[in-house]
Each structure stands twice: as C-alpha cells, then as structure tokens.
Image (spheres, rainbow, N blue to C red):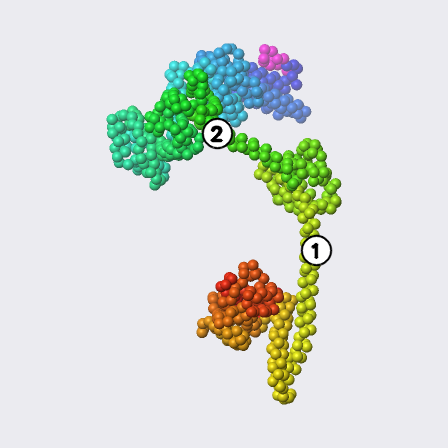
Amino acid sequence: MPDSIRITGGSLRAQPPHGRFGAGIAAALCIIGRILGSDAAHAQGAADEAGSVLDPVLTAATQLERPEVIAVTLTLGILCFAVVTSIMLVRTSRRLAETEAAAQDVIMAARAEADRVNALLRADPQVLVAWAAAADKPEIIGDTALVTGDHASHRLLNFGAWLAPDEARTMERLVARLRQRGEGFATTVRTRNDRPIEVEGHVIGGRAILRLKDVSGIKRELAEVTGRFHKQIEETEAMRTLVEALPFPIWARDEAGKLITANPAYAHAVDARDNIEAVNRGIELFDRSAREELFRAHEAAKAYAGRLPAIVAGARRTFDVLTFPTRRGSSGIGIEATEAESLRAEIKRMTQAHRRTLDQLPTGVAIFGSDQKLAFYNSAYRSLWDLDAAFLDNAPIDSAVLEQLRAARKLPEEQDFRLWKTQLHEAYRALEAREFTWHLPDGRTLRVVTTPNPEGGVIYLFQDNTKRLDLERRYDAMLKVQGETLDNLIEAVAVFGSDGRLRLFNPAFARIWKLEPGALREHPHIEAVIAWCHALSGDNPIWSALRTTVTAIDNREPVNGRIERRDGSAADCATLPLPDGATLVTFQDVTDSVNVERALRERNEALEEADKLKVDFVHHVSYELRSPLTNIIGFSHFLADPVTGPLTEKQREYLGYIQVSTNALLALINNILDLATIDAGAMKLNLGQVDIRATMEGAAEGVQDRLGQNNIALKIRAAPDIGSFVADERRVRQTLFNLLANAIGFSPAGETVTLSAQRLKDAVVFSVTDHGPGIPADMKDKVFDWFETHSLGSRHRGTGLGLSLVRSFVELHGGSVTLDSAVGRGTTVTCIFPLGQSEERTAA
C-alpha cells in the first residue's frame, strides 16, 4: 500500500513508496494521473504506456508471497475500476460540452429566424389570430385598426361590428368550422366602409390560425373584379332562373338568325322534350310568314312588337311578340294573348249583354260621360220621358236634356231652376250616390238616384214609384179592412211568431177561451197561453202538437183536431204555417155542428141496424118460404100428371096458374138467396170453359115465352168464331137472362131487343140494348140496389133484384157493369168479363 497520494492541479502525484511493491503502485498512479490529465486523444497512448510500466511490476509480483499477491490483486482491481470509470466520465463530460454548444447554436439561429419572421409578419398590413388547441382566448398579432378602424382588439372577432350581417354570419360559421373541425377556407369580405379584406383560415402546429389581410394594388383590383364577376354571375343566374321559370316563350338568336337559346316554355310550346332539343333542332314557334317578319326586324337590328299566331299543343294561340337587337343577334319573348283576346271579347259580349239587360229593365237608366254627354240610355228611359230616339242618339249633353224636359213640363216645378240643376250636377264631383224624389206635374212620382261613374261621369236611375205608392196606400187601407174583418170574425184567430210569442189575436180568441185581452197584448208565450186554456179544455193531445208546430224550426206540419171542453162545447183547431216563420192558429166553435153530427150518427146507426134487421128478415123468410114452396110445386106437378086422375078444364087452368106463380116465386126466392150468399161472401164460382154463342142462345130460350107474350123480337149478334172463355157458365147465363128479362119488360110492343157479344184482347163484352123509355140521370146510381124498381111509364113490374144480381155476378168474376141510358132513347147495359180467370173464385 502506498504511504500517501495527493491530487494537485488535476493530476495525481504519489509519494515514493517503500520497497518494490510501493514502486509498482507509484508507477500505476502516475499512469492514471497522466490519463486523467491528458485529453481523450492521448488516452490510448497512456494506456499503452501503463501496460509497459506494469509489466515489470507484474513480473515482480510473481516473486511475492501469497498475502502480498492478494493485496496486489485487490489493488490492481481497484485501480482498473478507477481507470475505466475515469475514462467514461471524461468521455461523457466531453459529449455534454459538445451538445450544449450545438444547442446554443440552434437557439441563436431560432431566435434570429423568429425575429426575421416577426419582422416579415409586421411588415405586411395584416392581422393574425391564433387559438391553441385547448384555449378559448386567442392570440392576436398585428394592428386591429387595419380591419376594425380602431385599436380595440376585442372588436376584431365581433364580426357584426365591422361586417355586413350576411358576411358576419358567414365568417362566424367559417371560424367555427375551422376551430371545431379544422376546415380551412379562403375568402374576401368587405368592411362596412367598403374596404376589401382577404381572410384565410388554416390549422398549423395544432393551432387554428385566422389571417386577415388588407387587399391593395393588383390584388385589390382583382378582388373588386372578382366581386363584380360573382355579382354578374349571381345576376345572370337570377335572370336565367327567371327566364326559365317564366311561362312565356323566350329565345335568343345569333347574327345569322339561328336559334341559340330558349327557355322551357319555348320547348313546351314547340312540343320539344327540352330547350336543348329545341335549340339543337332549331324548331321554330311561328309559321313562315311570321318568321319572315321577325327576320326582317332581326336583319335591320330593330326592335319588333306585334301580335302573331302560333300552334301550341294542337291549338291555335295568339302571342304578343317583342324582339330586341343585341350586340351579337337578338332576343325575343312571346306573351300569350289568347286569354286577353278572349277576355276582351268576353268583356265586349258582357258589355253588350249588360246593355241588353239594362234595355229590358223597367227602371230608366242614362249614363253620361265625364264630358256630360249621353253615352248610353235604355228603352225605359226613353219611354219614361217620351224623348225622340234621334235626339238621344246624337249624344246630347246633360243640360240640353234637362232643358228639353223642362220645356215639355216633365220636370219638378222649381222656383230657381238654375240652382236646382246646379245641385243635381254636383253628382259629377261627388264620391257617393245620392237619392232624390221628383213629383212631376203629371202626377207621377219618381225615385232618382245619381251614382258617380268610376270612369268619370254620372249614372242616372229613374224609377217610377207612382204605382208602388198607390199600392202602399191601398195596402194600408187593406190592412185596416183586414183588421176590422179579423176583429169581427166569428172564428177565433191567433198568430204566433217564430219565437213562440203571440203576435196577433182577435176578440173572438179572447172570448172563446175567456182570456183577458190585456194579458194577451203583452205577447205571452205559447206555453202560457196553453196553460190558460187548460182551465176550460183540460189536457188534450192537440195542445202538445200545437206547441210543437209553433216552436219547431223545420217540422211545421199543420195541426187539425177537435177539442172537447169541460162545459160540453167543442172547438175545431187548425194551424197554418206562414212564410215568415209565424203560425196562424184558428179555433171555431162547432158545438152546434157536433150536436147535429151526434144526432145524425145516432140516426144512421139506427138505420143501419134496421137495414140489418131487414136483411136478416129477408134471409130468414127466404129460407122459410122455399121449403113449402117446393112442396106446392111438387104437388102441382103430381096433380097435372094424368096418373093422378082426370081434371076438369077449369081445374087444369087453375093448376097452370099455380105452376106459373110458384115458378116466379121460386125464381124470386132463388135470387134473394143468391144475393144473400154473395153478401155473406160464401158464393163460389165453378169456373170452366164457357161457349159464348151457346150461352147466349141458352139465355134467349129462357125468355122465349116473354118475347111471344109482348110481341118483341130478339137479335143475337156475335161472331161465328167468337169461341169461349173461362167463367161460371150458370152465372153467365143467369146474368144474360136477367138482362134480357129486364130489357123485355121495359120495351114497348113491336120493338127489338139486341143481345151482342164481342171478344177483346183481354175481356169478353156482353151488351143488351132495348128501346124503352130510358133511365133518368138521377136514378142511374139506384137501379143496381136491392128492391129498387121503377116502371118509368112501362108495363114492367119487377122485384128490383135482377140488375143487383147482374152486377154481383159480374163483379164476382172480376168484371164491371156499365149503363148507358137517356130518357126516350133506350138503355144499353154492358157487362165486361175479364179473360184469364183461375179455376175457382170466391166472393169477397
């Protein structure tokens, strides 16, 4: 181990050690000191030198003892570590010095660059605004007076303070996009004092930079030119939009007259798909003659204005065409005048129609123009004043007309005619219509209305109110008469208004219901009137219907009914809706009529009961008489039979009388029974095919004895091929028999009875005609009743049941019977049997 080591002036100095080991250590320290004291360039050489020095030391160390060897090894290790550490420290220090020197150079260069850039920025007239990524407060560089006009930097970002509202909103939107999304922009704005400012927005180094620069020189001129260009573009686009939107055809031509531009309306007018096709194909709107006229104006570089026809969508249209020369051609527009022409014609027709209408009015109309000359008059005006048409057609002035009317004493007689005429002519300067009443010397009264004409002048309306005033006077007189009449009517009359209140009544109304006239004059409601009337009539459904009719709005059905009052009297109520919404109510005292009606009804009921008893009696007697009569007829036949025994001539004569009387009585009883059966609705028809000719001949055989007794001829008229029809043969024969018997009974001796039949499309018609005395008109409706018989001056005496049976049998077949007769002319009875009967028909 060395005795001591001292470091002086950055070098190691060792004190001389003792012995060989001390000398080796000293040599190593000297080498380290030289290394530390030298620079890096000599470090390698020092190391080599240390190696050469240590070699003998190491050689000497091999001669040392073990403890000494360990000590030397440790010492050498420490020395080596110290040497390596020293070397690294030196090298690090040297690199740090070199880095610091380089950094100082960069800083100096950056400062110089920043000063230069700042000088350049401030040299140009501009303002920079920078926003950091997370900062809201911007950094403003430059003089803000360049933009805002003052040095208040806070007004710079208040764009509305130095820009127009539209540009201010645009700047706010662009700056917001720049800061939020980093969208750059470049534009030019104008301040309120019309100074152009170039604005740019960029994102640099994480900062949003807004640059506002004054535009001057060529740039300013360029900006102004750009602004004008954009303005021209906008105006051009606006004009193009307007031209394309206009419904009128618009076109442009070049110097040669070729179509170069057209709008969609032009393309539509020429049936082209679009305006491009119309231009490319050169489709013309007008015909050849119109185009030649337009081309002449185009070649002469003159404007053209005229009305030309064209075919649009297959229809003929009229256009007002205007063309104007341009620098390199011409432009034109066609305004459709078809509707204008139609409207002009329609206005003309309407004017003529109005004139014709005014000419038909009963009111006199005269129209004077602003020059006070007569422009129009109707027939009523000329007839009212009886003026000469030639005079009126010459358009006389207003004063001339008045003078002529005054000379004919057809105007009101005024003391100061000039003042009166001046007041009348104030209508030419008036703004509103005025009305006058003229009382003419001939007794007429005119209503005169002067109306200012919007086009200048006056319209006179003359209405003859003479008849109207006369009618009003007569109407007033009639109202008085009607009032007196109403007050003296026996019927009770009341009129209720649409609001349900009593408007009018007569004294009979108050008297019949025992009401106070003073209370009725207060116009009570229908409810109150009904309540007052209940004291006499009680509750009656008619009152409810009356209330509904008076108060209803839509359903105002008339009410008719009778009210039975508690005192035994009765009143008929009737209502009538009036046109003005009111309701007329009348009450008529019918107590006497009701009493008479009751008596007549009771008498009628008694008569019906008696008639029923008569019918029942006839039915009963008929049935009771038939049985003994049958016995008498049977025994008379037995007596007439030779088997029974011989009879004397007198007995045989009397027996013949008995048989004739019993047969007549049996026929009468059968007729009564048939009528009773029909009346009871129990008779049935046995329908089948009836031979018309055979039935007529059968009925004629039944009356042969009567024909011989009365010396009467019978004619049967029917077509040979008349055929048959469906009916009850027995009842048809019985009908014809009764008709023939009745005709024979009323026919004088020597006359002829005619039985005829005719087949129609839907019926068979039988008729029996006689030449008897005829039937009076007042008896025609009675001849078909039961037991109605009248000789009418003939020898006929009947029971009055034959025609009743005829009508019943025919009606039972669904037919009808008619009677044609006149006094002294005979009678014709016609029976109509319908065709198409069913198999069986029952009496109703």
Q: Observer-nearest residue: 467 or 599?
A: 599
What residue is shown at x 45% (from left), y 14% (from top)? 193
Would you name the residue on which mark 2 appears?
Answer: 466
Give, as a three-letter code, the residue at label 2.
Answer: Thr
Cα–Cα gap, marks 2 and 1: 62 Å
Outermost residue toward the front in this view: 650
Please tell me which of labels 2 and 1 falls first in the chain: 2
Magenta span: 6-17
Give, as a three-letter code, the residue at label 1.
Answer: Glu
Disc 2: CA contacts within 10 A as few (<14), some (14-19) or many (>=20): some
- What SS does tag 2 mark? helix
Residue 194 in picture, x, y percent from top left: 44, 15
Q: Which mark is residue 602?
A: 1
Placement of 701 over or under 151, stated as above or below: below
Does residue 842 appear in this view? no
Magenta span includes 284: no
